[in-house]
Image (cartoon, helix red, strand yellow):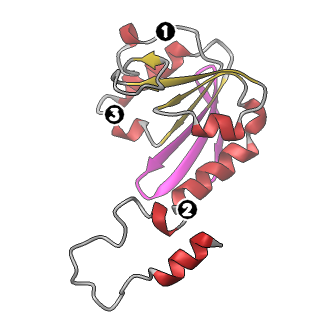
Amino acid sequence: MKRLLKRLINRPNWHNLRNLEPVSKIFALDRGTPIDRVYIEDFLSKHRDIIKGVVCERADNYYSKKFGNNVKKYEILHYTDDNPNATIIGDLSDISTIPQNKIDCFILTQTLNFFYDFKSAIRGLHYMLNGGVLRLLQLVELVKLVDMIMRDGEIIGDLQI
């Protein structure tokens, strides 16, 4: 209710489109849930039964805590050691910096498209995962969201195109 009142009071001025200031400076989080997060959370909710065991996410463990089912351990991958919650410091595109066969489920949302060498990042993801596990990926492909489930390096589900 508080969020709704805030949105009604702080309405953008659509008549002044010459303003160089963005409507929201925090990715519209102050105006409700961004639309991409709605699709991501819907996808994860539908597949919460495979978010189990040792679950890893990049930067934080928000989705694994929210949608995890029978999670034994939460791991957080971060590129540098400036994240106090990070349990794994490493670069997905450099397998010498990440542990091998440690993760049962890796939730990786909106990340691979920021890697210059995304093929190495996918190899790093596969390197970290235990054999025969399911991975949940969410990629932005130009203007559409593509959600995939992979098993043993092969795509077995291509959802919400």
Depth check, mark 3 against mark 2: the one in front is 2
On whether residue 153 falls in the magenta region, the answer is: yes
Position of residue 148 relative to residue 9, above or below, is above
Separation of residues labelled 2 and 1 (CA atoms)? 34 Å
Q: Mark 2 points at which residue?
A: 33
Residue 122 position in % (x across, y down): 45, 25
On whether residue 41 falls in the magenta region, the answer is: no
Q: What element carries label 1?
A: loop
Residue stretch rendered in magenta on the structure: 136-161
Residue 111 position in % (x across, y down): 43, 38
Residue 148 position in % (x across, y down): 60, 39
Side of 90 relative to 38 (left or right): left
- Residue at the location (66% across, 35% down)? 65
Are the two marked residues, 3 and 2, in contact with CB atoms closer than 8 angstroms?
Answer: no
- Residue at the location (34% across, 39% down)? 114
Q: Name the residue under label 1.
A: 99
Separation of residues labelled 1 and 3 (CA atoms)? 19 Å
Position of residue 72 relative to residue 107, above or below, is above
Q: Is mark 2 on a helix, strand or loop?
A: loop
Q: Name the residue under label 3.
A: 115
Depth check, mark 1 against mark 3: the one in front is 1
Side of 4 relative to 88 (left or right): right
- Residue at the location (59% across, 75% down)? 4
Main SS category, magenta section: strand
Quadrant where the N terminus is found in the figure: bottom right
At label 3, the amino acid type is Phe
Q: How crowded is mark 2: few (under 14 residues within 10 Å), some or many (20 or more)?
A: few
Residue 32 found in image quarter: bottom right
At label 2, the amino acid type is Thr
Instruction: Answer with mark 3 or mark 2, whichever residue precedes in sequence.
Output: 2
Depth check, mark 2 against mark 1: the one in front is 2
